[in-house]
Amino acid sequence: MAVRILTDSASDFDGVIASRRRIEVVPLPVQFGSASFLDGKTLSHEVFYKLLQEGKEDPSTSQPTPAAFLRYFEEAKAAGDQVVAILLSGALSGTIQSAQIAKEMCEYAPIHIVDSRSATAGMQILVNFACKLRDSGLPAEDIAGEVERLREKVRIFAVIDTLEYLRRGGRLTGFQAGLGTVTKLKPVVTVRDGSVVILHKAFGISAAVKQMRRLLTEHPIDDDFPSYFLYTDDRSREELLLPQLREAGQLPRRLHFCSLGAAMGTHIGPGSLGIAYIER
């Protein structure tokens, strides 16, 4: 009885890496006006940000349908395999509910659904950990339990470069966004209890990066696990943060890069940067 690892596209996995690690990815639907896409399948990150910045239509994302999960669950049931599904935070999306409905429809007990309480590379850390446990021969129920324990140590800190997309999503008024733009306000955010929370409001990118460094001092990185530099449309934003972390001796030893797709990019827009890791 094999163990299948499943996640959704809010994890922002590179397709080649996901395939190599035998990770199945359920895509989130993305809508630009009347045009419908599947995140990571029919809509690449590059095309997403091109459409986003053209500004002709505001995007929206939605949860996968139960049917999208049911196909994977039925295949596992037919093969007699176990499933561990590590999904986008239930506080951010109804993806978990769709998976639960699909499990009930499938009527197959060895499906274990885990709320990551995270997003993007925070999910990747948990999924990769699950793959390591799967490859060591651990059964699905034990893998799910270990992932749920580790998720409490996942940390994501990020700087939002522009307030425009928070305004478009209704999270800020036009006046607030305009005032923030004039004062070069750069919110520093985290994912706490599965929700995105503003920690600080820095004036300018230098002040925001300084806040990031302070947060990494307060919440040190565990280099036994991989860490990720997060970016939306521009990987070169690493130059704003990584050299400073290297100089301060805070640069993770196992650092990877993760481009944020539609699930997060819809709300925070281009130019954003951050880091995801396990706290020591």
Image (tube, rainbow, N blue to C red):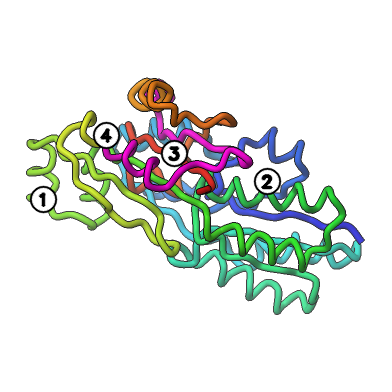
Quadrant where the N terminus is found in the figure: bottom right
Q: Nearer the viewer, residue 167 or 55?
A: 167
What residue sits right under mark 4 in the picture?
Answer: 210
Instruction: Say which label, 2 or 3, has the lower sequence index.
Output: 2
Q: Which mark is residue 128?
A: 2
Per the image, label 2 sits on a secondary structure element best described as: helix
Per the image, label 3 sits on a secondary structure element best described as: strand
Amino acid carrying mark 1 in the image:
Gln
Residue 64 appears at what percent x and percent y? 56, 60
From which residue to which does the magenta span run? 209-238
What residue sits right under mark 3 in the picture?
Answer: 275
Mark 1 burial class by Cα count in 10 Å: few <14, some 14-19, many 20+: few
* Residue at image location 70% in from the left, 73% down from the top: 103
Amino acid carrying mark 4 in the image:
Lys
* Residue at image location 62% in from the left, 42% down from the top: 225
Give the Cα distance between marks 1 and 2. Answer: 39 Å
Give the Cα distance between marks 3 and 4. Answer: 14 Å
Mark 4 burial class by Cα count in 10 Å: few <14, some 14-19, many 20+: few
Amino acid carrying mark 3 in the image:
Ile
What residue sits right under mark 1 in the picture?
Answer: 176
Q: Is residue 121 above or below residue 231?
A: below
Q: Are marks 3 and 1 in contact (CB under 8 Å)?
A: no
